[in-house]
Amino acid sequence: MDPLLALRPWQAPEVTSWGRLPMNAVDRRAGALKLDGDWRFQLLPAPDAPLADVWSSAYVPGVWTMQGTDDLPQYTNVRMPFAEFPPASPPADPTGVYEREVDVPADWSGRRIVLQVGAAESVLLVHVDGRPVGVSKDSRLAAEFDLSAVVSPGERAVVRLTVVKWSDASHIEDQDQWWHGGITRSVLLYATDPLYLADVTVRAGRYGDLRVDCRVREAGGALPEGWYVSGELAGHLLTQDTEFDRANAEDDRVSDFLGEARLLTTVADVRTWNAETPELYDLTVRLHRADGTVTDASHHRVGFRDVEIDGRDLLVNGERVFIRGVNRHDFHPLTGRTVSYDDLRGDLALLKRFGFNAIRTSHYPNDPTLYDLADELGFYVVDEADIESHDHAHEIADDPRYLNAFVDRVARMVLRDKNHPSIIIWSLGNESDYGANHDAAAGWARRHDPTRPIQYEGAAKLDWAATDDASDIACPMYAPIEDCVAHALSGRQTRPLIQCEYSHAMGNSNGTLADHWAAIESTPGLQGGFIWEFWDHGILQHVNDARPVGRGGAGLYDNGVAAPGHRWAYGGDFGETIHDGAFIADGVVFPDRTPKPVMSEHREIAAPVRLECLRHEGIVVGNHQHFRGLDWLAAEWRLSLADGGTLTAPAELPALRPGETAAVPLPFELPEDGGEAWLTLHVTTAGDEPWAPRGTVVCVPQVRLRAAAPQSPPPPVRNRFVEVDGDGLLVHPLLTSAPTLSLWRAPTDNDELGGMAVNWRAWGLDALEREVVDIRRSDGRVTVAAEYAGAAGVVRHTQVFTAVEGGIHIEESAELPDALTDVARVGSVFETVPGLDLMEWYGQGPWESYPDRSFGPPVGHHSVPVDELFTPYLRPQESGGRHGVRRFTLSAPDATGLTVALDEPRQVSVTRYRAEDLTSVAHHDELVPRSGCVVHLDAAHRGLGTASCGPDTSPSYLVAPGIHRWSWTLRAL
Ligand code: IPT
């Protein structure tokens, strides 16, 4: 039997690899032979099943679960997709066999030839010409094998990669994401001289100090006589510190020397690296033979920066930086996991445009290109090892059979990624309890790389203030704001508090994000966190046969929506019986990277420029960055007048250093009319940034210059009664459904998973029985009293209709019994005739907002087609709301339509869907838009919170029982 199969490495946690080369930071991507493309392929039912004679083909890099096999993607969060207890895996174990010929270049004769498999999940077995070469686990890091002894330059070799899907390793790769099988990153073949740079470790500090340690292999621990290493940093030559090397050879006091040769220098007037100004220096390290010729070279981009923890502050270059982070998976709706350079650049550029400055690579080392781009574009990265044993966390954390795997995974990540300035923290993994295996891994990382702190949520969660666990940072997940603040004020805080996950972005969510940041920015000891998460992991799927579309699907989606006949699949959509449904759709962007409204909210929370209104002196402008001036920004003043339009004036941003403020004169004279007035600073990029072209909006901070004068209701028109029918319902030519009371919204994911929707249904809020109690006509007014009966009692509702100039004034009140402690909304709902396709409003906008997610949208005059007001959350739910609306019109192209003026700023939504339309389907593509508009005006609307995973909204955003009153005026245009 084949010795690799005989070893049964898929059921041996102690075996992390066999025949695999040590991980290193020498980038071999350039100059290598790429073996990507179609490979011969067959899918076996188990690793030791016999090969068939028939081959199909599969694309590398890619997962077979998205390439036409019957083994389809499956989504589970915590629970394992199979019943076996660790380290066992199921006997039915899909195994992909990939095979292809490789022509080994003839000019590689005499060289060392290495195969690199970028990533394979979860066990990789390598054979060349039928001979066993090696085994690797650790699905998100490359595995390298020395093929020098098994291939011949100038000849053709058959490379076979066998990939076993389920193994002992699956138990520690139990992340909340789709399960796949395949080879997800590129396969390369490259050659080096027999004597080569085996590793390069770069350390570059903020004072310009640079140290480069080089490991050279096949040299018996020292360089052969006359050989040497040189460096070139931005055109300057660095020579080997032979004094140091000699001293080190004899003297082990220099215990952290990582190699055979060291380059040392100090760069004068160094331009330091930080996420705002990510200055990089090119470094080439060369290995020379005694005659000076170069035998190997390694290219690096160096960022000079320091990371340290000082008390409870995490400092970058001595600055306590805010961590405005997001958790990011390697995900793509067409490939599953394989991401290209353009994908990654798109992700990071988008994050920069919306104010993010940090990424946690949840929950494994991401594609190597991500770190190159994070260095270049400027992100603080928490690099996380591929360890999550969620379902069996407690058993595995101390299981010595997994000790090897824990240390191996953390060490390999550190070895690969150590030279990236963007990485400021190592993470030991996610959701794996806390045990001796973690301490062992932390020990390895601390010793090998003393320049970066380590974090691990599972270690710090037992006591945020502890000082003796594996985490240098308290990095809880989904901690309530009050708990974080209380800890920071307790006097017990010992280390920085940066949430590794917070503000769960499932569906219509991220309520109270601004409250988090108000607390963070005002509380020493709090430094930020990482939103969960970047992606909605919807896989593009054909609706008819429920198959994934795969690589060929570019163009089959737009603006967050799949093309007709397609949809974004979530858990269960591939026929899985064990799955966790839409919990996989919990990102701040749609599967095609279209930003959800929360992105705009975040952009404003993170605004680098802030405004404050001084009553007399004018406006205070503040620079809210850590390192950068305002010279990269351009701005324009905009004055929004409730009773006028919008005036603009050029803005000159003052020259401010980080943290500074300056008063500037008011750019406009306010008109005397007394109406509400808001001043916005429309801030854009002044030139091209690497992540945004010139003119990209950076933020739109706003201050109110004048409040609205108190309004009195419009005067009644004498001798005219408003028409209501026998049920007391308004009769109006523009309405197809009269205004009635609504206490219900299509539950959001937070409402469902947080348990609120259960109560709402039990109370019958989705189907209250309306009964008219009284219709009275007097003093020119029609008063309709109605009762809405549900299981929690009766809600009394009155509407007073008054004919006014050009329309109808409606005063409403609703009295909620005490039993209705927490409802979705209190307000009116009505429907309009078709054809009113444009909404224009004065209020907050233009993007979707809710009471607890309304920090960002500026008050102004906005105009959006009705079809674009709705946000296409994957699982339909309450959507499309706008907060702080003062008045709006709905109009047809011929300018007919209606206008509504509200008594005060209200939550309004105008969509094509009734709440029941949204609750009756499971995917966005199943919705059938109505031709008219469904309009909600709310006296009160419940906050969104984040209860699908984390705290609910704050009590101040709940809708209380008792009496609610609101009024509005409806007119035809
Ligand atoms: C936490 C996980 O770390 C993350 O992977 C994801 O599952 C997230 O929650 C929810 O979407 S774990 C959770 C049980 C707190």
Image (spheres, rainbow, N blue to C red):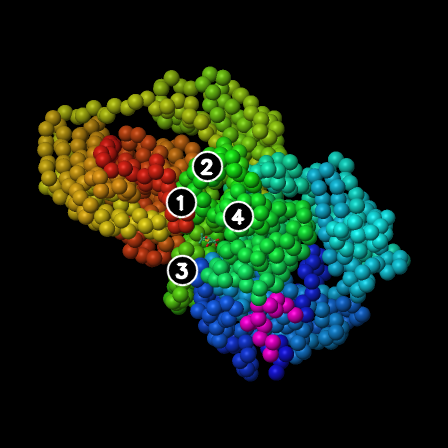
Q: Which residue is the site of mark 3?
A: 580
Between disc 2 and disc 4, whose residue precedes?
Answer: 4
> Residue 577: horizontal and vertical position, in percent?
38, 67
Q: Specify few, some or many for label 4: CA neighbours under 10 Å numbering under 14, 14-19, or 20 or more.
A: many
Residue 557 visible in the displayed image: no
Label 1 to label 3: alpha-carbon separation:
20 Å
Which residue is tagged 1?
951
Q: Residue type at mark 3? A: Asp
Q: Is residue 26 visible?
A: yes
- The kind of residue tagged 2 is Ala
Residue located 31% across and 57% down the image: 921
Cα separation between marks 2 and 1? 16 Å
Q: Is residue 808 above or below residue 159?
A: above
- Magenta residues (range): 6-18
Dot 1 or dot 3, earlier in sequence: 3
Q: Secondary structure at mark 3?
A: loop
**Relative to 861, is 649 on the left or the right?**
right
